[in-house]
Amino acid sequence: MTSTAVRPRRQTSGNRTNTLRGYPRGRRPTPRGRRPRRVPWPTRTGRWARHHKARTFLLLLGTFLAVTLWSLGSALTDPANGVGTSARLSEWLRGHGGGSVVTWAENLWYSHHPPPVGGAPAPGAIPPASASPSRVLQGPGQLPVPAPVTPFASPATPGEGTWHPVGRLVGGVPAVYETFLRPDAVHTSVVTGVAYMDTRLLSATLYSGSAIPGGGPWQVTAPISAQASQGLVVAFNAGFRMADANGGYYTQGQTVVPLRTGAASFVISRDGTARVGRWGRDVSLTPDVVSVRQNLDLLVDGGQPVPGLQSNDTHQWGSTLGGQVFVWRSGVGVTADGALVYVAGPNLNITDLADVLARAGAVRAMELDINSDWVNLATYDPGPAPTPATPASGTNLLPAMVGTPARYFQDWWTRDFFTMSARPTTGR
């Protein structure tokens, strides 16, 4: 019998030994008669490819985050996006496709912060009639002094619905009056402000912004110039962003956004006369028109709130605020004799706004901007013209209005707004 010698196993040490076969790692012998198998290219480069994709993804993600953070940081420090951080964040999100997120957040907030029911207004929120300053109340060329506004809540608070002259005198007489009242009989601690503007004494101007309506450069834009401030009496907010206004914009002979037939329109003629009406029915683009600002549809028509208004309508009248019901709102209307009436306040639903505008004498009225950061009216009383108005001489319609009368004098204010100034023939 022939014995067969057993080939001793090769001994190596350390990690270089294949513990299964005894060969150095990576050097297993190739069976006789076979060529070494080549590892396919994709297999050899797979690990490198995976690492390359991961590095590319991380690089792109880092770039995206850097750009996003830079954009967000710029928006949060830009006062033109609002006074508060929440408003600036909301504006940035809406401008970057995050409107649904803003809607959800605002729905959540307002659903947990409804307006108070019952209660009394804060002390001083409605000044008594005796607090009215001593002024000449009637003069030549002036519209009749407005009649008191009948309060909605009963019993009425002393001074509720009573007009008080404010702002600089024009031709020696008041051109602006303000009154304060509760907008309904349920939320009796909520106070709404109303401003009455005599269009025989005042001329209107539309100031265009670089963000609203965009475009430009504009000849008439913020800040209010030193020359324009010599006759300034009132400044107040315009409407929604043009993407939400469902209407157009015309100024300086340029149609910035196409005008929509049927839209609620604030129209300014060459002589500074301001009107509010339905485009194509009450007002149109005649050679005498210098500015048109449209926003949604008429809210008051024929002296009454338009038919079909629903207090909980969160689509047509409040889409830019996440479809909320009770929020800061503003509106402007025209009376039968041509005066302008501006209404603004917190915790207003759309029917409250329409009711107050109609009761204050508006025969046609439209909603303007909403949300606390954008609703503002300021009157200025620096003394007789041509004394220039300044932020220090301005007073907000309501003390709770966010921001100050200085916003219209800032070059960073990028939104459009209206001013009412003394007419040259009546005291300037």
Image (cartoon, rainbow, N blue to C red):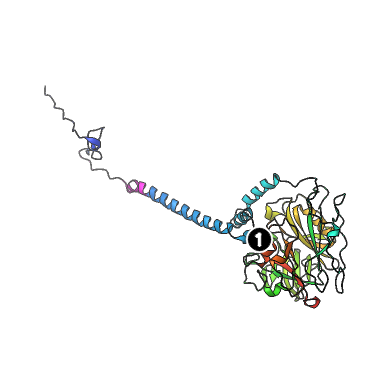
Q: Quadrant of residue 399?
A: bottom right
Looking at this rendering, what residue extends furthest in the left direction? 2
One can see residue 17 in this view:
no
Residue bounds of the magenta highlight = 32-48
Identify which residue, 22 or 194, lies in the foreground. 194
Q: Position of residue 203 (x, y in %)?
A: 77, 72
The amino acid at mark 1 is Ala
The x, y position of residue 384, in whole percent, is 77, 73
Residue 234 rendering spot, x and y as whole percentages: 75, 67
Q: Secondary structure at mark 1?
A: helix
Is residue 287 left or right of 411 when viewed as pictured? right
Q: Quadrant of residue 390?
A: bottom right
Q: Residue 342 colored magenta?
A: no
Residue sitting farthest toward the top: 1
Q: Which residue is mark 1?
A: 243
Image quadrant occupied by the N terminus: top left
In the displayed structure image, the side of residue 334 where residue 87 appears, left or right: left
Q: Position of residue 411 (x, y in %)?
A: 62, 67
**Residue 383 in sight from this viewpoint:** yes
Count the marks: how many? 1
Q: Quadrant of the C terminus?
A: bottom right
Local packing at callout 1 (Cα closer than 10 Å; few below 14, some 14-19, many 20+) is: few
Q: Is residue 35 magenta?
A: yes
In this rendered view, identify the residue nearer to me: 359 or 382.
382
- Front residue of 175/216: it is 175
